[in-house]
Image (cartoon, helix red, strand yellow):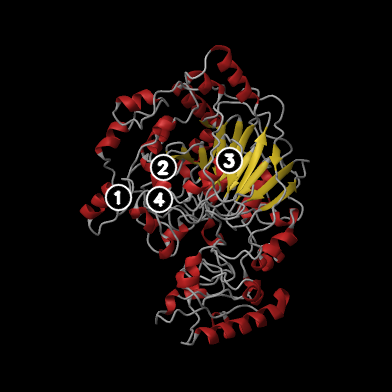
Amino acid sequence: TRCAPVVAAQVRCPPSPQATGSRGGLGGSAAAAAGEAAAAMPLRVAVEGCAHGELDAIYAALMRGPPVDLLICCGDFQAIRNADDLPSMAVPDKFKRMNSFYKYYSGEARAPVPTLFVGGNHEGSAYLWELFYGGYAAPNVLYMGAAGVVRFGGLRIAGLSGIWKEGDYEKGHGERPPYDRSEVRSAYHVRKYEVAKLMALAPAVPQGAPPACIAGMPPPIGQQQRPQQRSVSAPIDIFVSHDWPRGVTRHGNEAQLLKKKPYFRDEVRRNALGSAPSTALLAELRPRHWCAAHLHVKFQANVPHPTGETTHFVALDKCVPNSNRQFLHILEFPEANGPKTFEYDEEWLAITIEAHDSMPLNRGRSHGVPQRYTVSETSRQLARQALASRGSARIAPESFCQTAPPHGPAAAAAAAARGRRPQPAYRNPQTLALLQMLGLSYRLDETSQGGGGHVGHSNALPGHIQAFEGAILHGGAGAATAAGVGMGVGATAAAPWVIDAPRGPPLRPRMVLPAPAAPANPEEIDLDAELADENPEEIDLDAELAADNPEEIELVGDDPDGEIDSRDPEDCCGAVNGVGDDGVGAGAPGGGHAAVGTETTSSRRERLLALRAAAEATGPAAAPAVAPSTLLPSFDDDDGNASDDIVYQPSAKLPRL
């Protein structure tokens, strides 16, 4: 859905039949008729691209359109509670802004619809680490965790946070807040551990089955074999990620994509655009829909599977207030039925139990993580008993609790009292309650040596959280309110839920795809006007962009760690051209940097264009082995420190999986 500038008119979302009967505004047959009308409406899910903390603008745009039951945000959510969270967000300093999330965290504003999100590569990672297994980041705003599965309205929704970087994929979760300069980026990189857990949602691998390959896409990791049938659990209706599955562009209008984003052309040609683990998950799980963001462009594709199933893929643009960016899309599920509230998924809880002890917490390469976890019957029984003991699968919104003061006078006073010490990282009560419900230990503050207490971490909880801890184990609001820490939400009866209940005929969602409007921004000029003033000369190095789109500013000078692609002015591609978080290309053994002499911006640009043209002229087949001395030079920021310059290498030497 193309979102025009927001106006004052608002359209409220329809309440569920249960809520309609409890409001007291309708009675008798009127209430029953309203309930029947609400029940007859299809379940509508709005999908949003990169949020970048612009919740006010996103919700205002939603209120202008048709009523929706759920909002899903595909990463770069930027859940920043206060200024102390900003250092844990990997963006240039000029983009470290509070935006509007803190209003929803503090209670000043409330999300008008249930909101679900995954993490991207521009997040307040310190806060999301507290909610590693998922939980409410704000009232009515649920984070899916590093990986997760939840249910809503009868739909089964899976998600994977972060972006893929091959060099960190098999490492453990060794980062701990407060993050250093390297950890602030590696903290959001996808790990094999989360992918192996999600792989457990697919059926068991039969012997001798052909590979689960999608036409035009690379084989999944480890040459996974194609399942012959689905597992006994329900299929995945919606899968949410930040970056795209690799190769998905071949199943949509690739030519139109490259017209909008010409700097993707080389990656698309080499089938290097996107995430290889996500391709494996797409092939194995075969969800009905896959939603993503990251590349700041709307793109759709229909991906066929050997089983005859098809996955509808949609990626959305970022939210820019008062623009014509295509950052919203609506899916309709006419046959979906179920309580319109977030619920735990029994199979995912069993997978969490099964994989808990093997979670790698080391900084180096992890061992003992399989390609996919196999869930034992014991873990399934423990998950089933955990849900039965609490009487409901509902993830209670009342379980939200603030662990840091929201932006405002209280946060400023706390920061002044700490002085130069960083904001401590507390154990989030929601995480503690979930692990206690499953009978698991808390491991998020362990180090690779097995001990706890990372620098800046405190096991002691503030007084209001100590009163709250343990009050949310059974999913009801009454206990939390009795503890004196309720969020102003009255007690709500738990919605009934039957494990593995029949779900009727398969859902046949209908996409609402309005006719595309005339592009208001055909040259995709970057709308962040401040860039043009702060960085007037560092333009994109591609000659075609320099001619067609002169204002797409290059942020090289703001990216000392080398994760901004010189061709992508919006910093959405993560690690590109083999450049890692240390700024060193994969072909540079020993971590050496190419020396770059002092020169003017104009001459430096001309030299780089000549080197790039020479490298592209050789072609991938004729590209020689890359030695440190032959690395393409980077922009030198003329600060006398070569260690923070960005190093590029010929595209033919990109790592492949």
Quarter where residue 575 is shown: bottom right
Tell me: residue 107, above or below residue 177.
Answer: above
Expressed as whole percent of the image width and height from the top left, the position of residue 457 reads 30, 49
Inspect this view and state whether residue 132 appears.
yes
At label 1, the amino acid type is Pro
Residues at marks 1 and 4 touching, judged by CB atoms closer than 8 Å:
no
At label 3, the amino acid type is Ala
Q: CA distance from mark 1 to mark 4?
A: 15 Å
- The mark lying in front, picked from 1 and 4, is 4
At label 2, the amino acid type is Tyr
For the residue pair 51 and 592, the one nearer the viewer reads as 51
Q: Which residue in the protein does label 4 denote? A: 80
Q: Hey, which residue is sitting farthest left in the picture?
A: 417
- Label 2, secondary structure: give it: helix
For the residue pair 517 and 478, the one nearer the viewer reads as 517
Q: Earlier in the sequence, mark 2 or mark 4?
A: 4
Expressed as whole percent of the image width and height from the top left, the position of residue 258 reads 70, 63
Q: Hey, which residue is sitting farthest front in the picture?
A: 8
x 66%, y 83%: residue: 614
Q: Which residue in the protein does label 3 denote? A: 158
Position of the C terminus, as image quadrant, is: bottom right
Dot 1, crowdedness within 10 Å: few (<14), some or many (≥20)? some
Q: Which residue in the protein does label 1 denote? A: 424
Query: Which numbered tag is attached to residue 104?
Result: 2
